[in-house]
Amino acid sequence: MKTTSEDNRYGFALGRIRTREAFLFDHNRYEQLIAAETEENFLRLLANSPYGEFQKTNAEEILNDAWAENFWFLKKYCFDSSVLELFLYRADLHNLKLLIKAKIAKALSPELFLSPFGIIAINTLNEISQAFIEKGTTHQLEAIPGLPQPVVKGIIQAKIAFETTNEPKLLDCILDQAMMAYLITLAKISEFLYTYFLYQIDLENIRTFLRIRFFQEKETLLVQSFIPNGSIKLTFLQALFPDLLEMVIERFALTQYRTVVAEGVNYLLNNKSLARFERLANEYLLGYLKRARLFTFGFEPLIS
């Protein structure tokens, strides 16, 4: 496994990235946005920034367009299809879960919330979601072309589990589990990418454990939801299950996730919310991605 990709094809993209980084918001700009008392003032501040190129009437549309433009930038300059797939399949997972839940709830117009950046055609995802909610259609799922086999197996497992339990949370967990287990195998082309996805898996498993443990759900849900191939093992989390959550902080004290867990658990105990943990987990991942600034060539700065 390579430490870095060291691909000089990304030299031009790296130059454009460095230019973009110069316009990223600093702390003072965020303070100004927070202090804006009206949406009009907020939009005026955005207009006097790189976001001013997106001429929309509300902040949500501006940020959505900026997100989409950022994704197009990635697609344009990423010359490694296997690297791009890591992020396109995440969009497919989002779309698949949305379509399945829309059919279960008989909701209208889920298309409004679909991502346009997946690999799998929306028509194919519609076929999968329809077969998912119908009885006796497992063979149809096995026959749908274009899906990685590990993901197909995950969809079938999620279907069986949902038909047995009628539990949407379990549906989410099993689909996430199958997709992340597949993506980390793709990420082995680069130590940088592999480590990034390993951290994602670890933090998601810890979050799942804390949610299950705090809301006193069954340990079997942890086993069913656990994503393999991370550095935090299932047996480690199972051993913590009988402990008080305060003790969990001590168990993670010698790991790289000690700050995320300590502050996240304390906030959870005081506020009955995982919001702090989720924010710290995102900051941990962003902190890792910043290491790509040290790379001279390769796709790593583009991903970051």
Image (cartoon, rainbow, N blue to C red):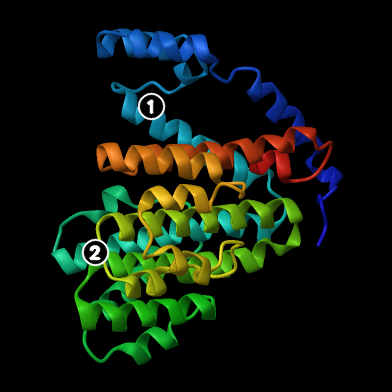
Residue at disc 2, secondary structure: helix
| Quadrant for the N terminus in the image | bottom right
Q: Indicate the amino acid at tag 1.
A: Ile
Q: Residues within 10 Å of mark 1 (few under 14, many from 20)?
A: many
Residue at disc 1, secondary structure: helix
- For the residue pair 223 and 246, the one nearer the viewer reads as 246
- For the residue pair 184 and 145, the one nearer the viewer reads as 184
Badge 1 is on which residue? 62
- For the residue pair 47 and 224, the one nearer the viewer reads as 224
Q: Indicate the amino acid at tag 2.
A: Lys
Cα distance in 3D space between marks 2 and 1: 27 Å
274 horizontally vs 232: left or right: left
Percent coordinates x, y for residue 77 in the rendering: 68, 43
- For the residue pair 36 and 236, the one nearer the viewer reads as 236
State the residue at coordinates (71%, 25%).
18
| Quadrant for the C terminus in the image | top right
62, above or below 186, in the image: above
Q: Which mark is residue 101?
A: 2
Percent coordinates x, y for residue 267 in the rendering: 35, 37
State the residue at coordinates (25%, 77%).
162
Quarter of the figure with residue 65: top left
Q: Residues within 10 Å of mark 2 (few under 14, many from 20)?
A: some
Percent coordinates x, y for residue 250 in the rendering: 50, 49
State the residue at coordinates (61%, 57%).
198
Q: Residue furthest left?
A: 106
